Image (spheres, rainbow, N blue to C red):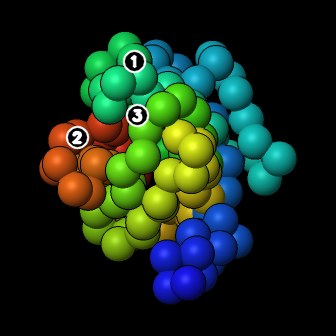
Amino acid sequence: MYRRCVVLVLVLALGTTACGGDSGAGAPGAVGDSGGPVFDLSIEDGEVLGGVRRVEASIGEKITIEVTGDGTEQIHVHGYDLYLQLENGEGSIVFDALIPGRFEIEFEESGRLILELTVK
C-alpha cells in the first residue's frame, strides 16, 4: 500500500519533460501536456535500450519519465528521493525540477544507472 501511495504522489507531483536538444531521450522536441520534457525509457532483459542517457531540464519544468518494457525493479530518482515501482514493466514519474544539479536515476535493487538528469 505504501509503495502505491508513493507512486500516486509521484505521479501527481511530476510533470512532463521535453528532450530539448540532443539528449537522446524521447522524440526530439517531445513535450508533455504540462509543457515540460518527456524522457522515454525502454527496458529489455533488465537493461535500458540504448544505454544510459544524459538529459537536461530547466529549473521549474515538469519532468516526465515514462518507462516501458519488461523491467520489474523499483526506480529511484536520487536527490528528489522519488521512487517508482514498475508494474508489468511499465510506469511513469512526473515531478517539478526545483532542485538544480546532476541526479542519478537508477534501478534501486541492483544500483544500475539508467538515466542521468541535469537540472539547470
Amino acid type of the residue tagged 3 in the rendering: Val
Q: Earlier in the sequence, mark 2 or mark 3?
A: 3
The residue singled out by tag 2 in the image is 113
Corner quadrant of residue 47: top left
Q: Is residue 60 visible?
A: no
User: Is 20 or 64 nearer to us in this picture?
Assistant: 64
Which element type, helix, strand or loop, lies under badge 1? Answer: loop
Of the pair 120 and 72, the residue shown nearer to us: 72
Residue 4 seen from this side: yes
Q: Three-letter amino acid code at disc 1?
A: Leu
**Image position, residue 17 (x, y; %):** 61, 43
Instruction: Give the labeled residue for mark 3.
Output: 55
- Quick one: SS at disc 3? strand
99 sits to left or right of 27: left
Name the residue located 68 percent from the left edge and 23 percent from the top edge.
29
Residue 63: where, in percent of width, then height? 58, 51
Q: Residue at x 22, y 40 (%)?
A: 113
Residue tagged 1: 49
